Image (cartoon, helix red, strand yellow):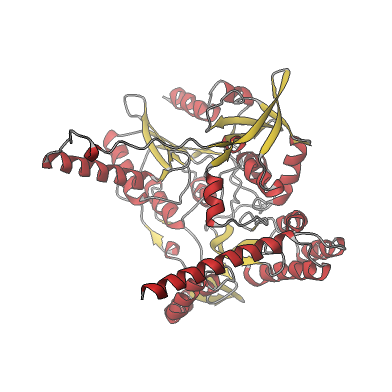
Amino acid sequence: MKKAILLVLVFLILMSCKSIKNHNEQITKLHDVVDLHEDVDKIYSQLKRHHPKLYQYTPKEVLDFKFDSLKRSINSPIDSRDFYKKLAPVVAEVKQGHVSLGSANKWYTKKERKQLLKRKLEFYALDFEYLENKLWVKNTRGKDSTVVGCEMVKIEDDLVSDLVATYKTRFASDGYNKTLYDRFVGRHFSTFYYKDKGYVDSLTITFKKKDSSFVKTFKRIQKKEQPKKRDSTKTKKRIKLTSVEKKANRLAAKKKRKFNRKHGYIKKSKEYTRNFCFVGSNKSIAYMKLRSFSNGNYRRFYKESFAKLDSAKTKDLILDLRNNGGGRIAEIDYLYAYLTNEYYKFIEDSEVNSRIPFLKFLMSNTTPNSIKVLSSIVSPIIVVQNLIRTRKRDGKLYYRFRQTKVKAPKPLHFTGNIYVLINGNSFSASSLISTHLKATKRAIFVGEETGGAYNGTVAGIYKIYELPNTKLKIRMGMMQIEAPQKQSPDGYGVMPDVEILPTIIDRNLKKDPEFDWVLKDIKSKR
């Protein structure tokens, strides 16, 4: 039995190595023009098949022309990385923020990944922000902070301004919104650069601080191994804990785990997804920072937070949705029930292109075979559930979520004044809850137009499809998620009541102009 298991493991390892080798050869070789044209046709076919609002912002004849022009421009063999650079701007013409194209990245074996993790490129410890048409180093997760607050001018032989202009063509906001581009390209510049250039061992970068420039080289450095903790059980004098102490340690660890789940701990940045505190000692102003709606036990967090607001008789709540890229519909529906003071319907029925959208989602060519097998077994249940929830109306198919039901506010819903902080990176679910608060005049919005559309977005569940020849992957939403309220013209985000754009001076002085304005407004009204 042991020999059989060992043989199976060896077989799986060999197959995995072969798969990695085949993938790397496939993405680095020059593809024939015919194969490249086939991939262009495949990706457009997948969009037409699964995306319910493909021509919402770009007419069919325009998109047809864009894809045909792309095929005509490809008249010689190229590899997958160069194909990505040609295809991504055309896919972005759909103008749907949840449609994204992945680049062709090399795969690594387990041994290679282990070696790579031992060495890190210092450049990727930097956080950037794009302000005043310049890319600034906002923060660093490394030890060298000398470049924080500096403008990045040049990377190797490339001007940063040229790189930014190029990267902005490779993704889309919802509709005709422009604020997302500056915010998104700054926040994800390192990722874009990796997709563009691939793995590098060093980077020579030119920075500018005030009127002077300097050059700094970033290299891959060996990560320092964490010193092994001394095992108290191996010491001569073993420290024995009493049963009471052991129990106290277990309870403390359990309490910490619960706190992390409730607030949504983010290990990489060592931050929490959900934060709540009072501003000042009298608890008349509260601040709630939500970085996303995607992890942790949100119900407990909101239940406890709004109970505190009710107990303290708080008059003003500042809800910070800046740089919140979205997440779960269930979470924003639950949160909104604490913010509204009237009955509400959170979303409309979602337009789809299939009566069995969840089965289509599960049976993508990127879905692991184990998941496909499991899906096949439970497919009768999935199909029945989908058919019950899907209805045809006016020649279109609609899927009904639980959030389409009319609901009452929570008993401890907040009745005071609400201020919402937004910017171009307030996207998807952030825009959806903002639409409700804006339409019902429940809050004052401060900042800039959201990157997500007021009138909804195509998201819900996602189809991830891998192109057969170049191995690029496209992700597309399959459901139109929208609030009952609409604005005209279509294709724009939630607009601020008070527009405030931060400057590099604000950042260097550690100022938050949007937050500061809210505090001044509250003070003036009192």
Horizontally, residue 196 falls left or right of residue 457, namely: right
Q: Is residue 55 visible?
A: no
Which residue, as the protein is rendered here, is positioned at the far left?
243
At x 62% / y 22%, what residue is drawn?
Answer: 505
Please identify the quadrant where the C terminus is shown: top left
Q: Quadrant of residue 200?
A: top right
Residue closest to the eye, 83 or 330? 83
Q: Quadrant of residue 364?
A: bottom right
Residue 262 in the image: x percent, y percent? 34, 46
Residue closest to the eye, 22 or 79? 22
At x 59% / y 23%, what residue is drawn?
Answer: 146
At x 15% / y 38%, what residue is drawn?
Answer: 241
User: For the image shown, how many numbered marks are present on the structure?
Assistant: 0
Q: Quadrant of residue 245?
A: top left
Is the residue 24 above or below the residue 323 in the image? below
Is the residue 283 above or below the residue 75 in the image? above
Which residue, as the protein is rendered here, is positioned at the far bottom?
380
Please identify the quadrant where the N terminus is shown: bottom left
Q: Is residue 122 visible?
A: yes
Is the residue 142 above or below the residue 408 in the image? above
Residue 188 in the image: x percent, y percent? 62, 43
Residue closest to the eye, 89 or 434? 89
Horizontally, residue 447 falls left or right of residue 181, namely: left
Residue 445 in the image: x percent, y percent? 53, 38
Residue 273 in the image: x percent, y percent? 43, 43
Horizontally, residue 523 falls left or right of residue 393, namely: left
